[in-house]
Image (tube, rainbow, N blue to C red):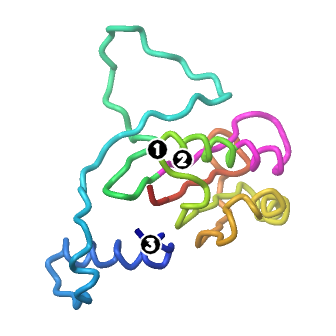
Amino acid sequence: MEKQTRRGLLKNAAAAAVGATGAVAMIPEAQAQAPAIEWKKKAVKRAPSGDKVLAPTPGAAPDKPPLFNGIISFGNLVFLAGVGAHFQGTIEEHTKHVLDELEANLKLAGSSMEKVLKVNVYLSDLKDYAGMNSVYQGRWGSVPPVRTTIAVAGGVPGNSLVEIDCIASI
C-alpha cells in the first residue's frame, strides 16, 4: 500500500466533510474505491505527565462530567487538546516539555510527530516567538505540519508560557 502524504490525508478529510454535510463532491474513481474508514469517536487515555494530577478515589463517582477529553481519535485522525507546562522555567524549557508530552500522547494513540497535520501554538507573550521556534523546529520530521501561532491576551491558563494542540493521522 502506498504511503499517504499529508496533502492526501487532508484531501480525504475534506472529502469526508463534504460527504457528511450532504454536498455532492466529484471524487475520482480510484479514490472512491479506497477502503472505508470507520468514523467512530474514541477517547484515548493520556500519557502520565510530570505535573501533579490528583487521582480519583477508586470506585468513587465523579462529582461532575469532565469538560473535555485530552485525546480523541476519529477514523484515522487523532486530536490532542492543548498541553501546557505548569512550572517555573524559560520558553525553551516549556516548549520542550510540551512537545515531549505531545509526542508521548501521539505514540499512545498510534501516531507520531511525523504524522501531525495541524498545530496551534498559544504564547503568553509574542516576545517568546523566537525562543519557542528554536525548540519547535525539527521536531516534526522532514515535512512540518501547518501551524497557527497566536499570543493570548491575559496569558495561557496555568501560567504556562506556551500551550500547543494538534491534529494527526494514525
Q: Which residue is mark 2?
A: 106
Q: Position of residue 71 (x, y in %)?
A: 44, 44
Magenta segment includes 48: no
Specify the amino acid type for callout 2: Leu
Task: Please count the marks in the image.
Answer: 3
At 58% across and 28% down in the image, what residue appears? 48
The residue that label 3 is drawn on is 2
Q: Are marks 1 and 2 in contact (CB under 8 Å)?
A: yes
- The label shown at residue 109 is 1
Residue at horizontal 33 percent and vertical 20 percent from the top:
63
> Considering the numbered disc 2 on the image, is that residue within a helix, a strand or a loop?
helix
Hey, which quadrant is residue 49 in on the image?
top right
User: Are the residues tagged 2 and 3 within 8 Å (C-beta)?
Assistant: no
Dot 3: element? loop
Please tell me which of labels 3 and 1 falls first in the chain: 3
Per the model, the C-alpha gap separating discs 1 and 2 is 5 Å
Q: Secondary structure at mark 1?
A: loop
Residue 128, above or below 10: above
Q: Which of marks 3 and 2 precedes in the sequence?
A: 3
What whole-number distance in Å separates the C-alpha atoms at marks 3 and 1?
22 Å
Residue 17 or residue 85, whichever sits in front:
17
Q: Which residue range is magenta in the image?
A: 80-97
